[in-house]
Image (cartoon, rainbow, N blue to C red):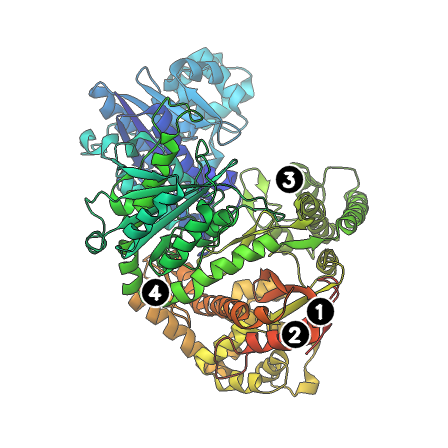
Amino acid sequence: MKLVALDTLNLIHRAFHAIPSLSTSRGIPTNAVLGFLNILLKLLEEENPDYIVSAFDFPGPSFRHESYAPYKAHRPPSLPELSLQVSIVREVLKGFGIRIVEMEGFEADDVLAALARQAGKEGIESLVVSNDRDLLQIVDDKVHVLSSGRRLDETILYTRQEVEKRLGLTPEQVPDLKSLMGDPSDNIPGISGIGEKTAVRLLQAFGSLEGIYSRLEEVNPINLRETLAQQKDSVFRARDLVRLRPDLDLQLPLQECESSLIDWPGAMEVLRKYEFQRLMERIGSQEKFDDLPPLSGEHTVISEPADMNWLRQRLSQTSLISLVAADETEGVSLAICPCSSEVLAAAGAGADEEVAMLSLARVERTHPHPPSSQGSLFELSSALSSSGGMAELAQRLLEEASDRLTVHDAKAVSQVLDSAGMTLLPPSFDTFLASYLLEPGRQAYPLAELCRRLLGHDLAKPAEGAEPEGDRQAPQTFLASQARCLARITPILRQQVEENGLLGLLQKLEIPLSFILAEMELAGVKLDVAGLRLLSERFEEKISALEAEICRLAGRRFNVASTKQLQQVLYSELGLKGTKKTKTGFSTDLEALERIANRHPIVPLILEHRTFSKLKSTYADALPQAVNPATGRVHTTFNQAGTATGRLSSSNPNLQNIPARTEVGTEIRRCFIAEEGNLLLSADYSQIELRLLAHLSQEPLLLKFFSGDGDVHTETACTIFNVAVAGVTPEMRRQAKTVNFGIIYGIGARALAAQLKIPEEQAQALINDYFRKFSRVREYLEATKDEVRKLGYAVTVLGRKRTFPDISSPDRQVRAYAERAAINSPLQGSAADVIKLAMVNMKRQVLPNFPGARMILQVHDELLFELPAGQVRVFAREVQMAMESAYPLCIPLKADVKAGKNWGEMAALV
């Protein structure tokens, strides 16, 4: 029997300093939480404990503070982002159902010692997990301590033998060792002039403090003997502080800590809340979920055109048809699952849906078939056979049944069917997009998870030991299981979508948009590969020149990209004062360097070096590698369900983070080019989020600014600085612009001060002046927070919802993160809605009139088209009208339209 006992705060601190910054889509930091969870899951998997418990320090002073006032008095307050994550870890542990133990007046080390002693009395071995060497004193034959090595994934197991090997002392001598040498981390002074080597030598010779003082005359040299005599009271008081208290009466039955009591569904929910998708997959793949019954049943393979009449007749009698498609190397498989109306009404519970399966041949295409937002939709182990003539009959069937069709990820399914020579018409329902609209904060929406969560079943899997290439039945069973799952979850999700008022958004916006994105992925964008290579060479020259100047200012050569060497140069050799401490010293991350950028000329050069290094590796070097050799174009993947706000994102490669308003960003964009005879056309919404703020807040000054032809940032500067337009300086306009956009994100004085590089008091005065003059904006923002507290979610202009469970959290920092996101969500989400609506309208109303014109990119508020040069003037007017009329505001929407041979050099058209 084994107990695993966690020194939780110690592990959180270790993870916080070992893992780079990480946050959720809501902006909540989670790097320490992730590190702790990785440790926890690894322990559960590798140690397989019978009992597990988490120990915390009790809030407030311990008996050690009362007996020695300077105890830990030098420690600075915890960083806000660390304190917040301690609260989250408590929430995570409660979600897992892992018992948290703490005792008033004592620290976690005392609790861990008491737990180990209690377990030992019951014949249970203990593994205490901590990096605190104080705990080595409790090691014995039944108690071991597991600590991290230099890296978080390295471990050291302290047995009695290992303690003696590493310290040269027994575990019982550890308190004496610590009292002699002191412990700076706890502010325990120790004996002056005694370090670890001297302390170990004394204890090896005399055994203990009592032994040292009973034979003090034998201690040499004489000055050490005199120091020990003078500080006798101090060293024994230190040992009282260092000694742990294993005799605590915790009144904790170990039966309440059994690992079998872990709440795995609860664990999945808390992991989902904080967007740990990989950990969810890690848990979901373990045996604890393997006992779910597979969703299986009979299926019929339709292999002859003559059998299609039977299938069409069957489908004509049902009100719901689920469709899944799997793209394979040698063919495409399509499963159609009809359900009776009775089954639909009963949400498919306990019914054996009849599944018909078609086998279709691949059609050779001149364009590529890029990966979808879900990758290969379903990975089958072998291909089904193909049969000629089936695609045409299946196409007719799909057209007849499109109003009853449900799919999981229409974009992916449409691309699979395209490779079989078929066209998927917009279905009536998409469970992938429905799940996204219902829970936009999640990172993925796999069908298998929906099956587990909504049906309590697992998808049928091929039999163990089956040879995939020889077992034709296995992939058919798997595909049929997915079709059956899709049929059952559709009515469940449809009811939820309808209850949340999201059906219109799904059917009129998101489903049509998925087909547009599929076309955009297939279209791709052409790159000037030679231009990018030249740019890479120029960036390399710039990086080399910056490195030479940085090393000259440092007074020696060093690796600028090395964190350790950079810390040494900045903080030790140049004597700069750091602003953020990490486990290895003062931080050299972006935020830390920006804070000290004005203290030495070397720092701005280091920041510039990082910028050019990132641009070179991310774009100049990587983009040519992403060009599809068959088309000569880059085919990004648009992630329709990748953000909580409703915005699109892109990946493989990410084309949405290319700098837009910098000189080097423009140089990169010049390498996005049109085919010979074509031009690129950009249509970009102007200040759409600020216009939405004016519309939603009904702030008279903003409405006035946007109804005229003036510049909103200049007008704002006039208002908050009380000057005429002629008196607005560039710095005033810059500050007003930063405030305007910062307000949208709930910016505070500290963040504004950092952005403007001004004192925090001045930043707060700017915010106060803004809200005094724009009082309706303040009222709107406060009303938004109140509404979200009341409802639990924020709503966009098209009814998109985003939940904020933390907005009423008792933790001030958690609540503040939620409030800032709640302020921004209706604005950023509405902006996303509007441009999506513009894309749908463009596809329906504009593009059909311009043969050869293609929408090829969407980057936040901008759309990029490629079209024949002769069509540009007329097309530009149509695009601008479609953009500006996409959604009616009480002030005009404005879109700037430009065209050119490349994305970086464009001229205004209208």
Q: Earlier in the sequence, mark 4 or mark 3?
A: 4
Q: Which residue is mark 1?
A: 899
Question: Residue 876, which numbered label?
Answer: 2
Does any portion of residue 423 appear in the rendered image?
A: yes
In this picture, residue 139 sits left or right of residue 535: left
In this picture, residue 582 sits left or right of residue 103: right
Q: Image quadrant for the N terminus?
A: top left
Residue at mark 1 to residue at mark 2: CA–CA distance: 9 Å
On the image, the x and y values in percent for residue 101 come to 27, 38
In this picture, residue 630 sits left or right of residue 88: right
Q: Which residue is mark 4?
A: 503
Residue at mark 1 to residue at mark 4: CA–CA distance: 37 Å
Of residues 700 and 723, the one nearer the viewer is: 700
Disc 4 residue type (three-letter): Leu
Q: Which residue is mark 3?
A: 563
Around disc 4, counting alpha carbons within 10 Å, would you say few (fewer than 14), some (14 to 19), or many (20 or more)? many
